[in-house]
Image (cartoon, rainbow, N blue to C red):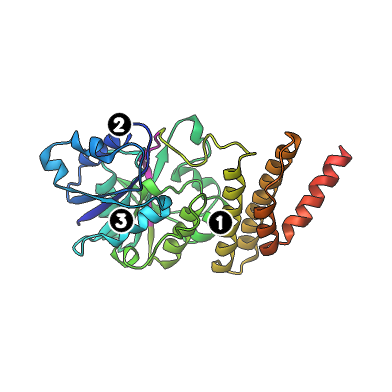
Amino acid sequence: MKCSVIIPYYQREPGVLRRALESVFSQTHDDFDIIVVDDASPSPVEAEVGALTLEQRARIAVIKQANAGPGGARNTGLDHVPADSACVAFLDSDDEWTADHLKTATEALARFDADCFFASIEGGEAFYYHFGVTDLAGSTAIERLCDDPPLVEIPDLASVMLRNWSFLHLSCMVIGARLLRTTRFEAALRLAAEDVLFFHDCIRGARRVVLGENIGATRGEGLNIFHGVSSDSPQFLQQQFNTWVALDRLESRSSQRPEDRASIRSYKQTARRQALWGQARLMRGHRPPQLGLLAQWAWRDPQILRSAVELAIAKIAR
């Protein structure tokens, strides 16, 4: 089964992409091509690819574009997948795959007639919120498909995801032809949560989703949009607003089960509170709040005004 590997590339540190590519070329499944989408990266892609052998470089297509964010870069990659590719695997440019990741994924898709596969991921202390597929056994029903490699299925995966999607990661995700030709990222939500919408759309659109308990990827330490962003920075408010927008869209796409709506609305409230605390920190530093974006948010979501009042009351009460 031929697989196209899509790597969106935007890094400031040299050598990061090279490590990711070396992990692809170390795969035990060798029927693949690679699409690197250079999203106007500050660190040149040529230096990363140039260190590889001629044979390796022949398997890589580099597409350059104006900066469109990670979702836009992945969409460009999806739009350039060759017609003979049966599936697509995503890999962030600062992450690395374990050697059997593609082999496990492609065999699982074929054996169980599935459209989507997720492996587990591990990372450093900065990614404490991620947990593996095996950890789901204590909180939801799991159907074991096989033991070598350990593969499972969750009957109501979309609802499980809405409670906590930290066991899902794009660098561990492989999708089949049925999804790669039709499903895309919402690139406008470039600062937050476009991956969550993509997960949901793929899970809902798949005939079957298989989960692997083994580690498929290791998180890297390259540029990450959430790390190093202060809560009183302009970018932070935009992130929280985009997160709320993504969650609002997710709510409209999800089933009307009360527990699903409750999960999404809880996340939406967290985004509101995070945004308001950041604006309060601005004002404590004698800087003006970002009234334009706050007004845009309030126009779409009057609930944020109520949250602001509740926050003020709680502060006065203390």
| Mark 3 → mark 2, Cα distance in angstroms | 21 Å
| Mark 2 → mark 1, Cα distance in angstroms | 36 Å
Figure quadrant of residue 268: bottom right
Q: Is 316 rendered above or below residue 162?
A: above
Q: Which quarter of the image is occupied by the N terminus? A: bottom left
Which residues make up the magenta segment? 210-220
Residue type indicated by callout 2:
Gly
The x and y percentages for residue 131 are: 49, 41
Counting residues from the N terminus, which is met first, the one under dot 3 or under dot 1? 3
Counting residues from the N terminus, which is met first, the one under dot 3 or under dot 2? 2
In-front residue for pair 51/294: 294
Q: Which quarter of the image is occupied by the C terminus? A: top right
Residue pointed to by mark 2: 15
Q: Residue shown at 69%/61% (left/top)?
A: 301
Query: Would residue 102 be counted in the magenta stretch?
Result: no
| Mark 3 → mark 1, Cα distance in angstroms | 27 Å
In-front residue for pair 317/117: 317
Residue 77, numbered label: 3
In-front residue for pair 202/284: 284
Q: Kindly state the secondary structure of the residue where label 1 is placed.
A: helix
Give the foreground label among 2 and 1. Answer: 2
Residue pointed to by mark 1: 162
Residue type indicated by callout 3:
Gly
Structural crowding at the residue carrying mark 3, measured as other residues with C-alpha within 10 Å and reported as few (<14), some (14–19) or many (≥20): many
Residue 35 as seen in the image, left or right of residue 285: left
Query: Would residue 215 be counted in the magenta stretch?
Result: yes
Q: Residue 144: tell me if it is visible.
A: no
Q: Kindly state the secondary structure of the residue where label 2 is placed.
A: loop
Counting residues from the N terminus, which is met first, the one under dot 2 or under dot 1? 2
